Amino acid sequence: MKTTKTIFQDGNHKWVAIVRDPEKPNYLIDTNEYLVTHGEQGILLDPGGAEVFPAVFSALSSEFDPSALAAIFASHQDPDICSSLALWLEFNPKMRCYVSWLWASFIPHFGGTADTFITIPDEGTDISLAGLILRAVPAHYLHSSGNFNLYDKVAKVLFSGDVGAALLPPGEDGLFVENFDTHIRYAEGFHKRWMGSNEAKRRWCERVAQMDIDMLCPQHGAIYQGADVQRFINWFDELQVGIVSA
Amino acid sequence: MTTALATTNTKASQAGVDLLRIVRINEEIKSVVAVAFKINIMALNAIFLAKRAGTAARGFGVLSNELRVFSQDLRDCMASLTGLIHGCVTEVSLVLQDIRHTRLLRQAVALSSVPRMAAVLAEREMENDRHTQRLVSLRKQLKRALEDAFQMVELGGVLAKSAKIEAAYGQSFALPLAQVSGEFDSIVEEIRTSLESLRRSAFFTGN
Ligand SMILES: [Fe+2]
Ligand SMILES: [Fe+2]
């Protein structure tokens, strides 16, 4: 089963990371899911693939009543992001899914109907969670062509999806980055190969550098906090992406 | 392995095997349709031949006409079989999807203690039963339609044999008429063999 770690709390405004399942088979990429709660409501960020649904569902329900989940935020269209959608909807058919307009007719192949999806325009949008405003921030082409991060100005947390992702070797499974230089080696290959556009990357770095962020939370790997956030932005800004040896 | 997991695996492999059997049945139906089309062309030629042979081959002409009607009826019958086959493919695909979802929901029930999830699983299992029942009903309909097709081919066989007899009265045209009616007969036999193998398909016998 996955574990839950509350990474931010102010009353009932919480960020809960759902991470690290020792029983997950190795052929499935490891993913982090994040639950944001405010008031009586919750939103689940990148709920994960169908195969990890039981582990995510049970971990989440140990923290929060899953019937109070109002929505899912899908940063993009990948199977590790949202192929569990049909199962979440089976549990709660009224749940909504926020996603880039680009993928609104693609993701229903995983589940959902026309009523399920709330599309996000390219420039992003505000998402209200019982009065808390979360901002869908454009991160297009990093790696997906219709891709969003989710920013919580109050908690100063940025959910960055695949940006900042690291493929950690066995044993290196801390929730937070402890040694940036060691950690970033596990992120380098991923960013060079999965990210396709240096221009998009530069614009993202400029945009995010302006934001007040305490924690940058990727969908794979460990969370960057404090000075490591800016370190990551600088490192990413310097990195040449879209590189393949073939 | 838990009993539930073992049952899930058995169901999944059964559905996979069913899908393969359905595909085989569909391929056989396609070949029957192709042959039925051939009978139509042959019957047209036979009708012209009988016209040329005149009164001596009048009986043969009537039978050729009947064979032409038979080939059209057979194609209609195969079209309805194809419709049923597509229905079976849809249901088996749903059953395969049900199996995966049920497995994951069952795991979620085992790992968590959310009462609503147990109800969701129960609903899912009822939906699975509905899909399974629909597949059972389609399987029966397909079997019945196949029996009808078989009866029809028996009639086609009688027509082809009668055409063979009529050919003997074709005087100077006796030889080409005998050749055509012989071809009719062997083609109808070919279809009969195909349908017989379909009737024996394990999709119906359930082995
Ligand atoms: Fe991705
Ligand atoms: Fe990912």
Image (tube, coloured by chain):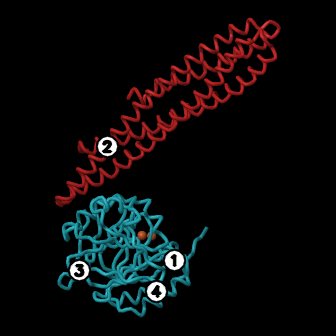
Chain colours: A cyan, B red
Task: Work out how far the residue at label 4 is from the one at label 3, CA to CA, in angstroms.
Answer: 33 Å
Q: Which one is in front, A220 or A112? A: A112
Between circles 1 and 4, the one closer to the viewer is 1
**CB at disc 1 and ligand 1 closer than 8 Å:** no
Chain designation of label 3:
A
Between circles 1 and 3, the one closer to the viewer is 3
Residue at image location 34% in from the left, 43% down from the top: B131
Asked if one can make out residue A31 in the rendered structure from this viewpoint, the answer is yes
Residue at image location 34% in from the left, 68% down from the top: A47
**CB at disc 3 and ligand 2 closer than 8 Å:** no
For the C terminus of chain A, give its image quadrant.
Answer: bottom right
Q: Residue tagged by mark 4?
A: A235
Q: Residue tagged by mark 2?
A: B130
Q: Mark 1 and 3 residues: CB-CB less than 8 Å, in contact? A: no
Q: Which one is in front, B175 or A179? A: B175
Task: Work out how far the residue at label 2 is from the one at label 4, CA to CA, in angstroms.
Answer: 56 Å
Chain designation of label 1:
A
Between circles 4 and 3, the one closer to the viewer is 3
Q: Are marks 4 and 3 on the same chain?
A: yes
